[in-house]
Amino acid sequence: MAGAQGKCFLVTGPPGVGKTTLVMRVLESLRASHPDLKVRGFYTREVREGSHRVGFEVVTLDGRRGPLASSSASSSESLRWPTVGKYRVDVSSFESLALPELQVKNGTDLFIIDEVGKMELYSSPFFPAVLQVLDSGIPLLASIPIPKAGRDIPGVARLRNHPGATLYTLSLGNRDAIKEQVYSQLVNSLSWQ
């Protein structure tokens, strides 16, 4: 794992603080300054009906999207899906979009994973794919949830404690400064520099 040292950048913080927004802004800045950057990965986005959040979708960096979780899924199949709070997690939809994006391929400069959390970890092949990305030595920018009541999700704890990980804890007051730190650290870690 020596090749992975210093190439795992994790953004954490409470729900709603702007982890996904920060990850996407860093990616936009990287693409603006390095237009030939080859990035693989995905992010999760809230699905809203009016002012109410009704679920989440997974979106690949090339724009493909599909359901991740829903509070209104009521088919006979969805009743067997695992739940996180009021949401039923569509593991097969998540896997069909996210797992191909985590395949280590020649020419990939950066991986984006937003997020490594409880919903995503219901996919048994997901965390091994994340570990393969870490072992590849290709820089990884990921978001992870903050531990609740002092308890961390085992996969998230393993990522947080990875020897090559740099952890950024986001708050409303430090978002712009953290974005600049993550951007400059990523630029320094990319192999084409």
Image (cartoon, helix red, strand yellow):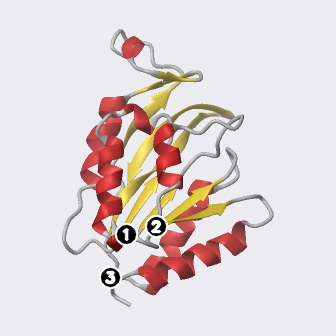
| Quadrant position of residue 85 | top right
Residue 106, image x, y percentages: 19, 71
Residue 104, image x, y percentages: 23, 62
Compared with 110, 101 (above or below) is above
Mark 3 residue type: Asp
Residue at x 69%, y 38% (from the top left corner): 150
Residue at x 47%, y 63% (from the top left corner): 163
Are circles 2 and 3 on residues that touch, CB within 8 Å?
A: no
Q: Residue furthest right?
A: 173
Which residue was labeled with disc 1? 4
Compared with 98, 133 (above or below) is below
Residue at x 69%, y 59% (from the top left corner): 170
Mark 1 residue type: Ala
Q: Residue furthest bottom?
A: 193
Callout 1: helix, strand or loop? helix
Callout 3: helix, strand or loop? loop
Which residue was labeled with disc 2? 164
Compared with 146, 190 (above or below) is below
> Residue 149 — which label?
none
Taking the image as drawn, is residue 32 in sight?
A: no
Which residue was labeled with disc 3? 36
Q: Nearer the viewer, residue 7 or 76?
A: 7
Q: CA distance from mark 3 to mark 1?
A: 22 Å
Are circles 1 and 2 on residues that touch, CB within 8 Å?
A: yes
Q: CA distance from mark 2 to mark 3?
A: 26 Å
Q: Nearer the viewer, residue 123 or 5?
A: 5
Name the quarter where the N terminus is drawn: bottom left
Badge 3 or badge 1: first in the primary sequence:
1
Q: Nearer the viewer, residue 55 or 118?
A: 118
